[in-house]
Image (cartoon, rainbow, N blue to C red):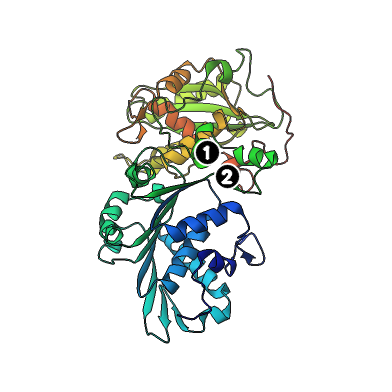
Amino acid sequence: MSPELPYSFLEFLSGCQTHDPAWPEPRPIPVDWDYIRELADRLTSQERVIVVKSRQMMVTWLGCAWLLQRALTGGPGIHVVVSKEERSAKELIERIRILLDGLPKEWLEEWIVSSKSTITLTNKSTAHTSRIVSLPAAPHAVRGLSPRTLFWDEMAFTPNDEEIWTAVKPAVDSGGWFLGVSTPNGPNGVFYRLAHDYCGEFIQHHLGYQQHPERENPDWQTMARAGLSEERWRREQELSFEGAEGRVYDQFNRDLHLTRPTWRAGKRKQSRFYRGIDFGYRKPAVVWAEETRSGEVIVFDCLLGDRWSLEELLIQIHEVDTRHHLSERDYTWTAVDPAGRATSDFGLSPWSALEEAGMKLKTRTSQIAWGLERVRSLLLDANRDVRLRVHPRCEELIRAFDGYMWDVAEDQPKKDGEHDHLMDALRYLVINLPRFHMPGLSRSPRIAGLSPEPDRD
C-alpha cells in the first residue's frame, strides 16, 4: 500500500470529487458538513451499517467512495456494489470511476488500475489485486462471490431482495463489511427487517433532510413537496416506513374534492378536454375531464357499462358528449388502456375501433404504483394543494374512490370488478397529462403559458 493513501475514510473523502450532469465542473465532497462527518465515522467504526435516508443526501456517492477506499486499503478480494437494475449498476460503476479518476495522483502511485466492465486494482509492491464489481438485482449474479465488502444501494426497491440476501449473507456472517442504503418503501422486505433489527447485529443510521445544511430554507421544502402526496413525502423525506393499506386513495374527501353541483364543463377559456377509457372485459369504464387554465383537473362525468360491445360503448360516449355540448374536435385526446391495441378474435382491436370513430387516442405504459402516485399527488400534494376534483353527478366514480381498496398480501389494489375499472380509466387519463410528460411540469400544478389564477367555479 502506498504510504500516501489515507486509511482515514474522512481524509479519503477530502480527496474525492463528484460529478453531477447538472454541474459543469466536478465538485468536492463537503467533508465539513456535520452529517457527512458523522456517517464517515460510522462507516469507519462499524462493519454492518443500514442507512435509512431522505432522498438526494449524497449517500450513494459516499457509499461508492467507501467501497473504493475499502478496495484500496482492505486487502485483496472482491468488493461488490448491488443495485436495483442493470442501468443503475452501470451508473454506480461509473460513479466509482469518476471518484477514482479524481483522486490525487500521488495516492495511486503504487497501483495499476484497469477499468473495464469491472475495476481491477493491483498493488505494485505486493501484487495483491482487488476487484470492484457492480451487479444488478439478480440472485445468481451475487452467489459464490464471497465479497469482502458489499454496498447495496436503493435496497428497499431492489427486486429479488430475499434471494440476494440469502446469497450474500454467508459472506457478511464470515466477516465481510456491509452497507445497505435506501429511502423507506413500506414495512416489507430485507431492508425493513434490517432497519428494525433489535438484536443489534446491524447498526441503524438515520439521515433526514433536516440534517442537510442547504435544506433548512422553507422555500426548499415548498419546492420539494410540490407534486408529492403526503404519504410519499413522509416516505421519501421523513423516513416513514408506513405501508399502503385500506383505501388506495384515502386522501379523497367528499367535502374537499367535490365541485358545486352548478359547475358546468366548457365555461372557461383555454381549457383542455380529455377522456380516459378502461375497456374492461365485463365493465368498460369512461371518465371525462376538463383541465382548467389554473391546472385543476375536473372530472365532470363518467360511465360504467355492463357487458357492452364496443359499438354500444361508442353510442354511450356520444350521448355523454352531446349532453355536455362537446364534439370530438373539442378533445385534446382520449387516453386508453395500453392493452387496447391487442387485436380481438374478429380482427379489430378496441384501439382501431375508436380511431375509426374519429378519436385522437393516447396511451402510456407505466407501473401501476407510479400511476397511483400521480393521482394521489393531484388529490392532495404535500403542500395541501388540491388539483383534482369531481362533479357530484359522478356517483359511480365517487363510490369507486371510497371502495377502491388495497390488497396488502399482493401489495397492489384489489381487482374487485366493481371499483377498479373507473379507477383504471382515471389513472390512464392522469398519467397522460402533459405535466407528467414535459420537463419542468411534473413539479408544477400549472399549464405552461397559462394563467396561474385558480378557477373557483
Place of residue 374 in the rendered image (x, y in percent of width and height, measured from the top left)? 52, 37
Which mark is on residue 238?
1
Question: Camera-side residue: 146 or 25?
Answer: 146
Give the SS element for disc 1. loop
Q: Which residue is mark 2?
A: 209
Q: Earlier in the sequence, mark 1 or mark 2?
A: 2
Q: Is residue 303 left or right of residue 78?
A: right
Place of residue 12 in the rendered image (x, y in percent of width and height, measured from the top left)? 54, 68
Question: Camera-side residue: 89 or 415?
Answer: 89
Q: Where is 332 relative to 285, above or below?
A: below
Disc 1 + disc 2, Cβ < 8 Å: no
Q: Inspect the image, locate mark 1, and give the three-letter code of the amino acid beneath it.
A: Glu
Q: Residue at x 58, y 70 (%)?
A: 15
Residue 433 visible to the viewer: yes
Q: Residue furthest bottom?
A: 125
Residue 216 sits in quarter: top right
Q: Residue at x 65, y 49 (%)?
A: 213
